[in-house]
Image (tube, helix red, strand yellow):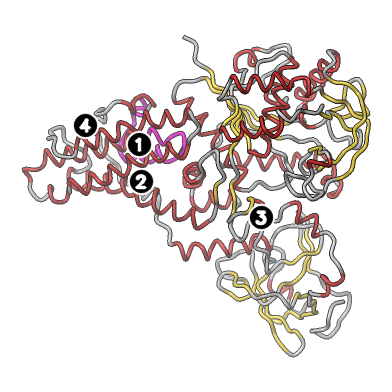
């Protein structure tokens, strides 16, 4: 019998900079679904990738003095490494710069043009480069982009248009007849009431004002605009319009497109209309999830939180991060991320509940029975209630995962974990162990704990890829048949007589106060080392991941803004490495009649002895901060690129303390 197929996609990511933990949210959710479906026996196709064309990419590459292809190649390599670190099991990774993708997009554009669904005209309107979106004047909010709040440009150019308005009524009918097509329901109502029913305008689908894109095959001064280019990836990745369309025929239509709420409109209106025009089936569902927020602001506006997924995974482990992302945020709604919430969740759910349950169970089996549960057992009070609770978890997990309710599924699993912990308190194995005649009863209690953990190790596997194997190793489970998905639905198959293996604590408890201080130092040190192709401060960092908007606005300052900085010449009197921080130096600076202590992230570029006596530029009126517990009174200036860092110094001698103007 042929396997059922399951095709799940994430949006293809725009390589405009370093990914933060918020970008991992969608991909981790998609990966959990892909893992779950594979465990259920499905033939899964999980697609992710990168959307690499557009005016914004071209401008960023020009600023760096490199080609757009070089620019995206560097960033895409980092994205792939991140997905590897997060153990994302995507089957394919598509880039819109792939040759096959470009060829097929040109074919799609030509077919739509030949059949009259694309026509040439002239576009005049407002364009937001960061969002790659066109807006009418009435759609602007205070004269700015309604999506991101940034400045827009008035654009007038010859363009090709897609007859989006032609498919308005068909789209409304499809959505009304297929209530699961757009989820959650709030997104469906938004699309119908805010866009479709008020009326659609035809869509600009080519540009002539920049060149970084796929050329229109029959009119090469035009490049194909992002939505026909990027959205087509879901079928070009399946070899649509090639000599071998077997994958397209096998997996399309997609079972679900997971997208952020800010791009629901493009996926539920433009993309389905394109497919209707091509005569192809529509995806079964588009699910628009919420944003991962930081203290009420979008993830790109961090206030002191470490949001670098590489740091977080290396510090707390992959499964802790994946668990937090899927457990704390209802998938259709916005969620709040903070390092404190992450640590509290690790301590309460993973260390106290699951980790402690594994450690106690294995330790008691080892202590009371030499590591092997005997065959002679005796049932007693509380057994059946435990069995009932644990055995409900697999079916409830399935039911909730089918609805993409990751946090609710994990809540059900943790009910089973909590009930198993409670069972230990109810049965009090330490009391039973005092009398040898209780040995059969004690053996049953140990067996029930081990069997509960066997089942729990199976149903957490979609969410946490590393922890199940750690649990199974400690339980001595080596037979793969006992840990298949369907094996979670049968109670009592944990084998008698196998030896447990006492191991390390799976999730050590974290001391919150100490950890928060360390994270603050990591944020400070990392930001201070951030390479930039311009002069920048390297000792006292901003506690923020700046959005592109703030970077753009920061490019222009008034003379009054500049005058607020007290820049002084300082002479380095002493320098030493900071213990436990290979990137930091502690400097003693002469500033006229006073001395200052500054901690600077230059240790990888300068030996202490090499900078003693140098005159450097100090921002002297910054509020002091502590790095690695050492107070830093200001910051020194340097310039860096990807290969080296050089201190900003003078071309001659001048008295220390002199003002820089």
Q: Do the residues under discs 3 and 2 have CB atoms within 8 angstroms?
A: no
In front: 32, or 94? 32
Mark 3 vs mark 2: give the one in front. Answer: 3
Alpha carbon of mark 3 to alpha carbon of mark 1: how far?
A: 37 Å
User: What label sits on residue 380 in the rendered view?
Assistant: none
What residue do we see at 62% from left, 71% from top? 577
Q: Do the residues under discs 1 and 2 have CB atoms within 8 angstroms?
A: yes
Pick whichever of labels 3 and 2 is earlier in the sequence: 3
Residue ID for mark 2: 354
Against 578, is 404 above or below? Answer: above
Pick whichever of labels 4 and 2 is earlier in the sequence: 2
Counting from the top left corner in percent of width and height, residue 460 is at 41, 36
Counting from the top left corner in percent of width and height, residue 543 is at 65, 62
Residue ID for mark 3: 301
Q: Is residue 573 magenta?
A: no
Relative side of 207 to 356, left or right: right
Mark 3 vs mark 1: give the one in front. Answer: 3
User: What label sits on residue 456 in the rendered view?
Assistant: 1
Quarter holding the C terminus? Answer: bottom right
In front: 460, or 447? 460
Pick whichever of labels 1 and 2 is earlier in the sequence: 2
Q: Residues within 10 Å of mark 4 (few under 14, many from 20)?
A: few
Q: Residue furthest bottom?
A: 593
Alpha carbon of mark 4 to alpha carbon of mark 1: how far?
A: 18 Å
Which residues lie in the magenta part? 457-483
Q: Is residue 467 magenta?
A: yes
Residue ID for mark 4: 496
Mark 4 vs mark 1: give the one in front. Answer: 1
Q: For the residue labelled by badge 2, is the local secondary structure a helix, a strand or a loop?
A: helix
Q: Residues within 10 Å of mark 2 (few under 14, many from 20)?
A: many
Q: Do the residues under discs 4 and 1 have CB atoms within 8 angstroms?
A: no
């Amino acid at each position: 019998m042929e396997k059922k197929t399951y095709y799940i996609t994430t949006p293809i990511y725009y390589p405009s900079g370093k990914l933060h933990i918020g970008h991992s949210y969608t991909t981790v959710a998609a990966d959990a679904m892909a893992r779950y479906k594979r465990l259920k026996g499905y033939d899964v196709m999980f697609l992710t990738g990168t959307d690499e064309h557009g005016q914004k990419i071209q401008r960023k590459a020009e600023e760096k003095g490199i080609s757009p292809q070089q620019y995206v190649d560097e960033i895409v390599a980092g994205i792939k490494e991140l997905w590897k670190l997060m153990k994302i099991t995507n089957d394919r990774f598509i880039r819109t710069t792939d040759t096959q993708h470009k060829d097929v997009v040109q074919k799609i554009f030509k077919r739509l043009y030949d059949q009259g669904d694309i026509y040439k005209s002239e576009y005049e309107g407002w364009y937001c480069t960061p969002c790659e979106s066109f807006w009418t004047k009435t759609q602007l909010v205070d004269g700015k982009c309604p999506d991101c709040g940034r400045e827009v440009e008035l654009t007038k150019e010859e363009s090709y248009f897609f007859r989006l308005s032609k498919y308005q009524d068909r789209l409304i009918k499809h959505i009304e007849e297929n209530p699961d097509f757009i989820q959650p329901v709030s997104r469906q109502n938004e699309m119908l009431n805010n866009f479709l029913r008020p009326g659609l305008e035809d869509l600009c689908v080519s540009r002539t004002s920049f060149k970084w894109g796929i050329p229109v095959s029959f009119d090469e001064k035009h490049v194909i605009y992002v939505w026909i280019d990027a959205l087509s990836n879901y079928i070009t990745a399946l070899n649509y319009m090639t000599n071998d369309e077997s994958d397209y025929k096998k997996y399309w239509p997609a079972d679900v497109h997971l997208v952020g709420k800010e791009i629901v409109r493009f996926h539920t209106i433009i993309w389905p209309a394109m497919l209707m025009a091509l005569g192809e089936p529509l995806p079964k569902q588009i699910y628009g999830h919420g944003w991962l927020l930081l203290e009420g602001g979008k993830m790109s506006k961090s206030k002191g939180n470490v949001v670098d997924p590489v740091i977080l995974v290396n510090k707390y482990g992959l499964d802790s991060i994946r668990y937090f992302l899927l457990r704390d945020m209802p998938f259709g709604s916005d969620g709040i991320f903070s390092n404190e919430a992450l640590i509290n969740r690790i301590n309460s759910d993973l260390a106290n509940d699951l980790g402690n349950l594994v450690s106690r169970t294995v330790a008691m089996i080892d202590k009371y029975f030499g590591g092997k549960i005997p065959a002679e057992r005796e049932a007693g009070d509380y057994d059946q209630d435990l069995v009932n609770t644990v055995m409900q978890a697999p079916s409830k997990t399935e039911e909730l995962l089918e609805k993409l309710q990751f946090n609710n599924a994990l809540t059900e699993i943790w009910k089973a974990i909590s009930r198993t912990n409670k069972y230990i308190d109810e049965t009090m194995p330490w009391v039973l162990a005092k009398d040898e005649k209780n040995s059969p009863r004690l053996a049953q209690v140990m067996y029930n704990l081990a069997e509960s953990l066997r089942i729990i190790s199976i149903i957490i596997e979609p969410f946490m890829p590393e922890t199940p194997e750690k649990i199974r190793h400690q339980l001595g489970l080596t037979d793969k048949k006992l840990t298949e998905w369907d094996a979670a639905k049968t109670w009592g198959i944990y084998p008698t007589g196998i030896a447990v293996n006492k191991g390390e604590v799976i999730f050590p408890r974290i001391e919150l106060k100490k950890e928060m201080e360390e994270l603050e130092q990591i944020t400070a040190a990392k930001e201070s080392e951030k390479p930039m192709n311009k002069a920048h401060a390297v000792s006292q960092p901003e506690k923020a991941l700046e959005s592109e908007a703030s970077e753009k606005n920061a490019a222009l300052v008034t003379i009054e803004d500049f005058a607020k900085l007290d820049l002084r010449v300082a002479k380095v009197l002493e320098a030493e490495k900071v213990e436990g921080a290979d990137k930091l130096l502690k400097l003693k600076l002469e500033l006229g009649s006073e001395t200052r202590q500054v901690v600077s992230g230059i240790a990888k570029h300068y030996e202490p002895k090499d900078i003693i006596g140098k005159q450097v530029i100090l921002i002297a009126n910054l509020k002091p901060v502590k790095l690695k517990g050492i107070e830093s009174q200001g910051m020194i200036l340097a310039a860096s690129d990807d290969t080296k860092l050089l201190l900003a110094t003078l071309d001659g001698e001048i008295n220390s303390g002199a003002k820089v103007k």
